[in-house]
Amino acid sequence: MSQDATKKRAAGAHHAGAAGQKHAEDAVRAELRPGQSIELLKALHILTREGRLNQDSRRKLKQVEHLVRFIEKILDELTPHGDQLTLADHGAGKSYLGFILYDLWFKPRGSGCIWGIETRPELVERSRELAARLGFERMRFLNIAAADAAHEAALPARIDVVTALHACDSATDDAIAFGLAKQAQAMVLVPCCQAELAARLRMNKALQLSRTPLAELWRHPLHTRELGSQLTNVLRCLYLESQGYGVTVTELVGWEHSLKNELIIARYSGHKKRSAAERLRALLDEFGLGALLPLRFAALAGTPQRPAVPAPDPEAPCIPAQKREAHD
């Protein structure tokens, strides 16, 4: 083959490759929101280095963005009451939710603040570095357990919205307790791995089988796990209603995308339902779970709680670190 023919073939292959790459990029952009940061999605490994989506990352993106749309609606509803909205994301992990929400809602508005709360220090540090690299100045990350977050002085005295995407087991309950302590206007929860209640059902199984035929609902281990998960979320909803929240329960995405699919949305109305508190207590008694009342539903048990530590200035934590010195 002549040298000219070789060059032509190479040029043709290059042109075809470039065209294919552009076609792939256009296909990906068609699945994204207008103005969505490609750099961010690559940094989160949702997009490959070449800017493509694989099956797993497409499923992850669909799930997170579906949740983002629910949260955006809530933020839009709250915006007329104040533009400096604060959101705390519990069990943030790699902060997929926080980063995408900031990119799509907080960044365009130039106001508001997101706090990511996570126990793994390496993930917190990674998120801090990524936020700095992208110029996401109003994102903050704390290496702290959800159970301790309400008493963390670095946080504002009030938080408008609390989220918890797949916060494992009782971490969802800790997020709810945090939201109550911070007088949150809304909570958006996707529970995960509800093992605590199932373990307590197993402990009392023999006694309950002799007491009530309802114990047949959790006699077999598989049923124990399933009932434990269902009952945990029912109790959480009743607790939120008893504390003045209107609650909606729905699916996050189709079951083909995730089995951890129950979405609990709670909006504060101020109307505390006495009947919800009564039914919660009745369910605990019926299932032999009375010990959970002071542990997970402290507001109904009259359990003294440490007051949340107020921040001296609720807006100061949202000010970028390099500007805070001048502010102070």
Image (cartoon, rainbow, N blue to C red):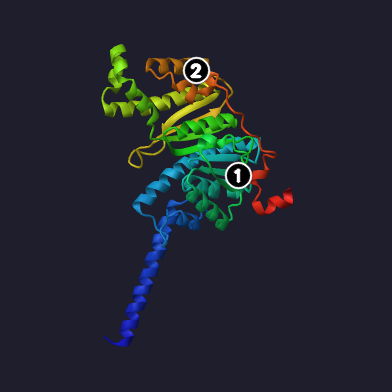
Residue occupied by mark 2: 277
**Which x, y percent locates residue 311?**
66, 38
User: Quick check: 278 above or below 231?
Assistant: above
Front one among 105 and 239: 239
Residue occupied by mark 1: 113
Q: Residue at x 55, y 39 (%)?
A: 88
Front one among 261 and 199: 199
Q: Residue furthest top?
A: 211
Amino acid carrying mark 1 in the image:
Cys
Q: Residue at x 31, y 84 (%)?
A: 5
**Which x, y percent locates residue 258?**
36, 40
- SS for dot 2: helix
Q: Residue at x 32, y 24 (%)?
A: 202
Give the crowd class for mark 1: few <14, some 14-19, many >=20 residues within 10 Å: many
**Which x, y percent locates residue 328?**
73, 48
Pick whichever of labels 2 and 1 is earlier in the sequence: 1
Occupied quadrant, residue 306: top right
Amino acid carrying mark 2 in the image:
Ala
Q: Residue at x 26, y 85 (%)?
A: 1
